[in-house]
Structures are given as structure tokens and as C-alpha cells.
Amino acid sequence: MNAVELKGLTKLYKKQPAIDQVDLSVEKGEIYGFIGPNGAGKSTTIKAMLNFIYPDQGKAMLLGLDSIKDAKEIRKRTGYVSSDVRFYPNMTTMEVLKYVAEFHQLKNSKQQIDYFIELFDIDAKKKMSELSLGNKKKIAITAGILPNPELLILDEPTNGLDPLMQHRLFEELEKYNQKGMTIFLSSHDLNEVQQHAHRAAFIREGKIITVQDITKEKSLG
Ligand code: ADP
Ligand code: ADP
């Protein structure tokens, strides 16, 4: 069973396809890159597979579950980091992370939250609305990772992060991936994806153009 299976996923805006017949399979345990320029359809694909928007055609299965019928179960087992973080503007960063920990009934949550606060140099007292995009991203990423989901979907996570924080993020993602987390990483940065992903799909103007096997190419030198 694949972690993500998209078949013919299509979403129209004013009769124009934002994504057009997207087929994609992510195996369990992969770090899978999703590369394309701004406006290519990365966020639309992600929102459609998570059932935040309804596709006009096609089907998405996540963790073997139907994206529409089983949306609730999928939300429980999947982490999502949106490209533009807008949640909980009036809560402090600490309140957001504690809320996430409570919602998922996490054990040792204080230790884990403190770990990420230190790792990402988070100001625990600031309100979400007061943060820069990069600092909001750190909270969204932490909130996505903390529950240790089977599948973590990150939409342009490094936007706004400085190089040190990007480095720490990927170290963390690789650790979790080695413990079994499947990671779906959308990015416009080819380098970033080729450094960290095992395979990657390229999307342009709403269509998947090619899928690259990065691990295989590296092993062939
Ligand atoms: P990416 O995430 O790769 O930058 P998006 O999925 O956000 O791309 O956008 C794909 C296309 O769909 C773009 O042409 C964008 O303008 C269009 N689009 C996205 N969301 C909407 C919307 N809510 N209404 C109309 N058009 C949209
Ligand atoms: P938009 O660009 O349209 O604001 P988002 O990706 O931020 O899109 O959110 C799309 C939808 O998903 C919204 O209804 C939002 O409330 C919901 N949402 C965003 N982030 C999460 C999350 N981490 N978990 C569950 N739902 C979320």
C-alpha cells in the first residue's frame, strides 16, 4: 500500500485547470520531492489530496484511505504544513504547540516542545500574528512533526527560513524518516529536493512532467 496515490487529480479555476490529470505514487518510507515553479500547482495538489478543496476529477488515496470518505482519519494520521501559515493569530507560539500536543494526547510533550523551541530558536511568548513568515513556518513545522504522523506533507517549508534553520529542519526530517515517517516535500528549489529526497515529481502548468529517481542516480554516480 502506498502512502500517497493520486489518479487523474484535476482542479479547475474558472474552467482553467490549476492541476490537470495528476498521477503520483509515494511509497511508504520515502522522502518524496514535489518540484515546480510558483503557480505550477503544488499547493493545489496538496490541498486537493487533503480534501481542503474538492477536485473536479480524479481520486486521492492517502495511507490507503479515501481522501474524501476518510478525511477525518487521514487528518489524524497525517501532518500538514501549509505554505502560508495563518492559524491561531492570537495565540502565543507556546500556546499553539501545547494545544497541538493536547489535541494529539502526546506523552512527554513538554520535553519535545522544549527540544523544538531550542532547535528552531523559537520565541515562546510571541503571538503568531507578530511573527515573520519564517518564524511562523517554524511553528507550523513543529506542529506538523510533534505528533509523529505516518505521513508529513510540507508545502514549501523552507520559504523564509535562514540557511541554519533549513539545515536543522532537514536533519530533523531525516531522523524522523529513518524511524519510518513518509515525507512529501513540495519546493521550487531543485537543489534542496535533490539533496534530500529519494524521488521527485516535477510539475509544470498543472501537469506532472517527469519523475526522477534521485537515490538511483546518486548510486550510479
Ligand atoms: P504552487 O503551489 O505551485 O505555487 P498553486 O497550486 O498555488 O501553485 O497554483 C496553481 C494555479 O492555480 C495558479 O495559476 C494559481 O494562480 C491558481 N490558483 C490557485 N488557487 C486559486 C484560487 N483559489 N482561485 C483561482 N486560482 C487559483
Ligand atoms: P489557504 O491558502 O487557502 O489559507 P491553507 O493551506 O492555509 O490554505 O489552508 C487550507 C485549509 O486547511 C483551511 O480551511 C485551513 O483552515 C485548513 N488547515 C490549514 N492548516 C491546517 C492543519 N495543519 N491542519 C488542519 N487543517 C488545516
Image (tube, rainbow, N blue to C red):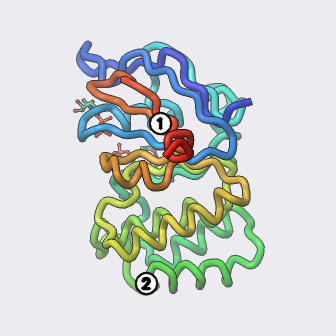
Q: Is residue 63 above or below residue 137?
A: above
For ligand 2, tell me if the residue under mark 1 lies within 8 Å.
yes
Horizontal arrangement in the rendering, residue 127 relative to residue 3 (left or right): left
Q: Is residue 214 above or below residue 7?
A: below
Q: Residue at x 40, y 57 (%)?
A: 157
Q: Is residue 85 above or below residue 24?
A: below
Q: CA distance from mark 2 to mark 1?
A: 31 Å
For ligand 2, tell me if the residue under mark 2 lies within 8 Å.
no
Closer-to-camera residue (39/203) = 203
Kindly identify the amino acid type of the residue bearing the numbered disc 1. Answer: Phe
Q: Residues within 10 Å of mark 1 (few under 14, many from 20)?
A: few
**Residue beneath disc 1:** 52
Is tag 2's residue or tag 1's residue first in the polypeptide sequence? 1
Count of number-bearing discs: 2
Q: Residue at x 27, y 21 (%)?
A: 13
Q: Residue at x 36, y 58 (%)?
A: 86
